[in-house]
């Protein structure tokens, strides 16, 4: 008897892409800019979001969907900096968010009062690279404690991202990290990648990041 092969991954990904289209259409109906914030664990992306909410939360009408494997700790941290609901998605072990989870999360958000949506993905530089969540662009966050070869080790994530944030620059005097080499490695993978150098802890470098977000919301485009 012939063997029939069913590629489950392809079917799952195709279904996800259908949900991503629905997310994108729903956001477009409300003129909402959405960014998928991706990183490895410990890069400082939650603190970056906290600083962003503190400064721009009300100005840009920011809403957040945050994913975590087992807890809603990140969502609780972010909720302290905004009066808006921070929608937590606990994946129960899955290493990424999917578009259906984001679509469901939008039901709890007042989209008429939202202009910018951050999707804080699960801390992982492998799985989230393959999943379209309906965002305008992926923003990859990594830190000076992770090594200049991070883009070379996880090329698909840096290839899929449109912007990169190199965080924890306050530690540069204390770690052997070459910023120019890190940027060069990343642009070997993705020559169009645009960089921000930040320290969410000391707030150094955040003004260019804030300016970028203001411009994207005003102009309504990710590029």
Image: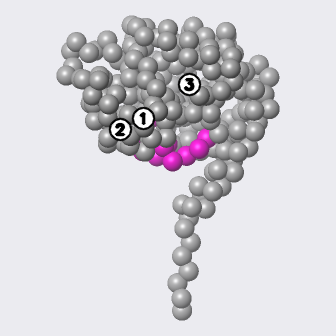
Crowding at dot 2, Cα within 10 Å, few <14 / some 14-19 / many 20+, comes out as some
Residue at 67 percent across and 44 percent down: it is 20
**Separation of marks 3 and 1 at Cα, in angstroms:** 33 Å
Q: Which residues fall within the magenta stretch? A: 123-133
- Does the magenta run of residues contain 127? yes
> Could you tell me if the residues under marks 2 and 3 are in contact, i.e. CB atoms within 8 Å?
no
Q: For the point 61% across and 28% down, which residue is it? A: 222
Query: Which residue is the site of mark 2?
Result: 188
The first of marks 3 and 1 along the sequence is 3
- Residue 125 percent location from the top left of the image: 41, 40
- Residue behind mark 3: 75
Can residue 67 be seen by looking at this rendering? yes
The quarter of the rendered structure image containing the N terminus is bottom right
Q: Nearer the viewer, residue 189 or 142?
A: 189
Determine whether, in the image, residue 8 is placed left or right of residue 111: left
Q: Are marks 1 and 2 in contact (CB under 8 Å)?
A: yes
Residue hosting label 1 = 191
Quadrant into which the C terminus falls: top right
What's the residue at 45%, 41% (across, down)? 159
| Placement of 168 over or under 54, stated as above or below | below
């Amino acid at each position: 008897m012939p063997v029939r092969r069913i590629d489950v991954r392809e079917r799952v990904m195709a279904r996800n892409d259908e949900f991503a289209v629905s997310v994108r259409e729903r956001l477009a109906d409300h003129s909402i800019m959405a960014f998928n914030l991706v990183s490895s664990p410990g890069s400082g992306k939650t603190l970056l979001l906290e600083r962003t909410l503190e400064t721009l939360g009300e100005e840009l009408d920011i809403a957040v969907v945050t994913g975590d494997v087992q807890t809603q700790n990140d969502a609780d941290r972010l909720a302290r900096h905004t009066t808006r609901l921070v929608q937590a998605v606990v994946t129960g072990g899955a290493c990424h968010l999917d578009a259906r989870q984001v679509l469901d999360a939008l039901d709890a958000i007042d989209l008429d009062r939202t202009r910018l949506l951050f999707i804080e993905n699960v801390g992982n530089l492998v799985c989230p690279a393959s999943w379209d969540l309906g965002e305008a662009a992926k923003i990859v966050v990594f830190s000076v404690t992770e090594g200049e070869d991070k883009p070379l080790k996880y090329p698909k994530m840096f290839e899929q991202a449109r912007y990169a944030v190199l965080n924890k620059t306050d530690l540069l005097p204390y770690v052997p990290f070459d910023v120019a080499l890190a940027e060069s490695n990343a642009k070997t993978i993705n020559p169009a990648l645009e960089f921000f150098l930040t320290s969410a802890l000391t707030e150094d470098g955040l003004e260019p990041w804030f300016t970028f977000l203001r411009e994207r919301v005003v102009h309504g485009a990710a590029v």
